Image (cartoon, rainbow, N blue to C red):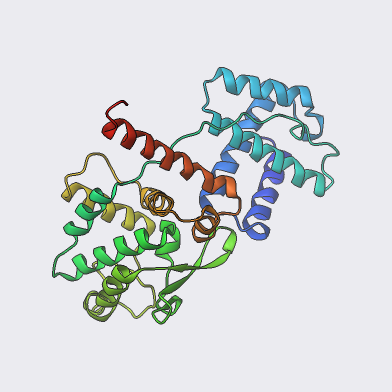
Amino acid sequence: MNEVLENCLVSYIEYIQIEKNYSEYTIKFYRQDIEHFFMFMIEQGISDLQKVEYFDARLYLTQLYSSKYKRASLARKISSLRSFYKFLMREKIVVENPFALLIQPKKELRIPKFFYQEEMEKLFQVCDGPSPLDKRNKALLEILYSTGIRVSECANIQLKDIDFDFDAILVNGKGNKERIVLFGSFARVALHDYIKTARNQLMQTAAPHHQLFVNYKGTPLTVRGIRHILNSVIEKAALTGKMHPHMLRHTFATHLLDNGADIRTVQELLGHEYLSSTQVYTHVTKEHLRKTYIAHHPRA
């Protein structure tokens, strides 16, 4: 990669990191997408970003199709490059965006995986123990299921963010956007028990801090740590497969809609900017209705 391309990429990464406040996860994939396109430029003998034309963008997309990329990956790569060139135009490095008119492939509609209520009961039963870690795990599971928050949002909760008077938590979501989420009576009891007893025991040898969830050493629990705990819980519950942390978020949304919640309310609780992000869960509930119908109707 030549120095000019490298400098443009560095400037863009700083832009989406500081001004756009993108997550580390998003930044990682945007960088990979742009570097992949730089390799294409080298293969095509194009050394200047200004010389990339719409035809080149089309050719790049064709090569991606030939390489059997999934539609979600194709859409992200085109989005990354469109955003990159938009930045370059703003900085007056280029005058046109060759990806502006490129039609993004539609994403495959994947029905999110979720837990049935009977499965959730098994998970909670696994955490019904007297030890500090049992109490922490139960509070963690209750909060994730009761609020539908992302695991990254859960890992960042501090004690001051919890309002027991209104059964609400202030969370910091994507794009550094704050929102209020609500939790129910089961989560309140589990959370109160964890904070008053278990957390204090786990914190005995750790330096003081205000993070809500802690590991066995008393230090703040990480996203990776939460993932490990959830997989341990599902293994003990003898449920098949691994629990992706996002499954609890999917379960939260699905169970709300199954029980008659308004989709706009679910959108707000999930912190989705666009309703289309929430609408995927209506497909989940329809599939659930279809399976129930087939299982119980004598003429199905």
Q: Is residue 146 visible?
A: yes
Image quadrant assignment for residue 2: top right
Which of 9/200 is in front? Answer: 200
The picture quadrant where one finds residue 37 is: top right
Q: Position of residue 286 (x, y in %)?
A: 43, 38
Look at the picture and state if 91 lies above or below 78: below
Q: Is residue 258 above or below residue 152?
A: above
For image coordinates 74% across by 23% down, the residue present is 56
Quarter holding the N terminus is top right
Compared with 221, 122 (above or below) is above
Q: Is residue 222 left or right of residue 80?
A: left
Residue 28 relative to residue 89: left or right: left
Residue 7: x and y, percent? 70, 45
Q: Position of residue 57 (x, y in %)?
A: 72, 26
Seen from this angle, which residue lies furthest left? 130
Quadrant for the C terminus in the image: top left
Q: Nearer the viewer, residue 297 or 112?
A: 297
> Residue at point 64% right, 40% down?
80
Note whether residue 3 is visible: no
Q: Residue 115: x percent and y percent?
A: 31, 47
The front one of 57 and 147 is 147
Quadrant of the image occupied by residue 168: bottom left
Residue at image point 41% right, 57% down: 151
Q: Residue at x 35, y 64 (%)?
A: 143
